[in-house]
Image (cartoon, rainbow, N blue to C red):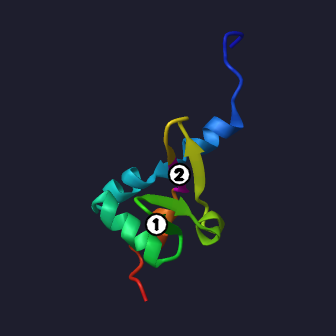
Amino acid sequence: MENAKPINPKKEKDATRLTTSKLAAQLEMKTNELNKKLVLLGYLEKKNKNFYLTQEGKKAGGTTKSTGTRAYVLWDASMLEKLKEPMA
């Protein structure tokens, strides 16, 4: 095991997170439909053509990541169950 790489807790945590498009695929929805639902639930807000994580979205486990050219949201896998629930 002397060649084993140390575990990076940040990368390990990101491995359990899903992008909005992957979350949509697991919910059998289109990404734009899920974005609309996330806006209605207060987790995202839309400004111009972009979606931004709200305080509620952060409380629900969303985090923003950036590739340098674009930003995206990662969600805890637990969001799957929350989003399967019917909207009130």
Q: Is residue 9 above or below residue 77?
A: above
Task: For the C terminus, give its image quadrant.
Answer: bottom left
Mark 2 or mark 1: which comes first in sequence?
1
Q: Nearer the viewer, residue 35 or 69?
A: 69
Instruction: Identify the residue shown where x is 67% and y is 10%.
Output: 3
Where's residue 68, x and y in %?
55, 35
Amino acid under disc 1: Lys
Left of 21 or right of it: where is 18?
Answer: right
Instruction: Identify the residue shown where x is 70% and y is 37%.
Output: 9
Report the Cα–Cα distance between label 2 and label 1: 16 Å
Q: Nearer the viewer, residue 62 or 52?
A: 52
Q: Is residue 12 above or below residue 31?
A: above
Instruction: Identify the residue shown where x is 59% and y is 51%.
Output: 64
Task: For the N terminus, give its image quadrant.
Answer: top right
Q: Is residue 83 above or below residue 8?
A: below
Residue numbers of the magenta segment = 72-76
Element type at mark 2: strand
Left of 29 or right of it: where is 47?
Answer: right
Element type at mark 1: strand
Q: Of the numbered discs in the image, which one, if any, rests on residue 70?
A: none
Where's residue 47, x and y in %?
48, 64
Instruction: Classify residue 30 by image quadrant.
Output: bottom left
Where's residue 81, x and y in %?
46, 68
Instruction: Classify residue 57 by image quadrant.
Output: bottom right
Amino acid under disc 2: Leu
What secondary structure is the stretch in magenta mostly built from?
strand
Instruction: Identify the residue shown where x is 55% and y is 41%.
Output: 15
Q: Residues within 10 Å of mark 1 (few under 14, many from 20)?
A: few
Q: Of the numbered discs in the image, which one, if any, rests on residue 46?
A: 1
Q: Is residue 74 magenta?
A: yes
Residue at mark 2: 74
Where's residue 6, x and y in %?
71, 23
